[in-house]
Amino acid sequence: MHEFTDEDVEEIINDLHRRYGDTFSKRRVVKEVTKARDLLQPVSRHPDFLGILIEKRARQALHARAKKRGETLHAVPEILFVCVHNEGRSPMAGAFAEYFGGDRVFIRTAGTEPTGEVNPVVGEVMAERGIPIHDFPTALTGDLRHTPDLVVHVGRHIPDLAGHRQITWPVQDPQGQPLETVRAIAADIETRVRDLLTSMGVPISEHGQDEEDLETGAESRSE
């Protein structure tokens, strides 16, 4: 059983402010989260789900406030990529999503049996592409502080994960595979990530630039 703490509250506040910071100040987010906590924590019978309930109530309050002001909240979608060890497939997917999605998406990765390390061959393949792979914020299977918009199970479906929408990608495990095979796995994941972002309406960026910016730059260089 997870004991709900002030650290959990701070994470909820930071997540909501990151998602809705264009519309609401952090002070307003703190107020709504605090009100939700004061209302729900004394009567909660399920501490493991308290974070999700507080986040949901605070989010609904922000939406209601925005609607009253005649505004519509456009949140940055959060994607959680999950595999077993969080050392190959999910970090690759997270790196591609961050690279192509930029600040239009928020990425987390997780593993049911995380090793805390990135597969060195995976790191080499991503380095060849010039895409950094690093430690992403991690959401563990038993840590239900909030619910991501989308959970992508990279490899096989992992049960008992919270997420508004869940999909599974049957991607080969790079563990113990030669360089050429890992390159093919990376290419597969890249294609899937690009298609996913496009389906979510997230503009694809290259090297931190929008495709429109790249086209404009190309035109100016050709003039």
Image (cartoon, grey):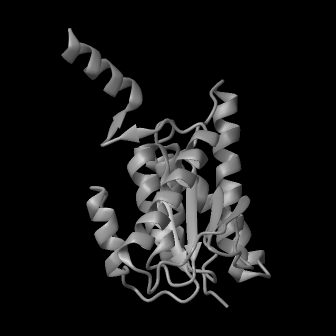
Residue sitting at x 58%, y 40%? 198
Labels in figure, total: 0
What is the residue that sits farthest to the top in this orientation? Answer: 223
Q: For this view, does 145 lie left or right of residue 194?
A: right
Q: Does residue 205 sit above or below 176 in this rendering?
A: above
Instruction: From the top left corner, tell me how far across and down residue 169 is, in percent.
Output: 65, 65
**Apparent side of residue 165 relative to residue 145 in the rendered image (left or right):** right
Q: In which quarter of the image is residue 211?
A: top left
Which residue is more in the foreground, 155 or 10?
155
Give coordinates of residue 61: x percent, y percent. Answer: 68, 47
Q: State the residue at coordinates (62%, 61%).
A: 148
Q: Residue at x 22, y 14 (%)?
A: 222
* Residue 133 can be seen, yes or no: no
The residue depicted at 45 percent of the width and 49 percent of the height is: 26
Q: Nearer the viewer, residue 43 or 67?
A: 67
Foreground: 147 or 174? Answer: 174
Quadrant that contains the C terminus = top left
- The vertical placement of 105 against 86, above or below, is above
Q: Is 114 above or below relative to 92?
A: below
Q: Which one is nearer the viewer's eye here, 148 or 126?
A: 126
Residue 116 seen in the figure: yes
Residue 214 in percent (x, y) is at 32, 27
Q: Quadrant of the N terminus?
A: bottom right
In percent of width and height, residue 155 lies at 62, 74
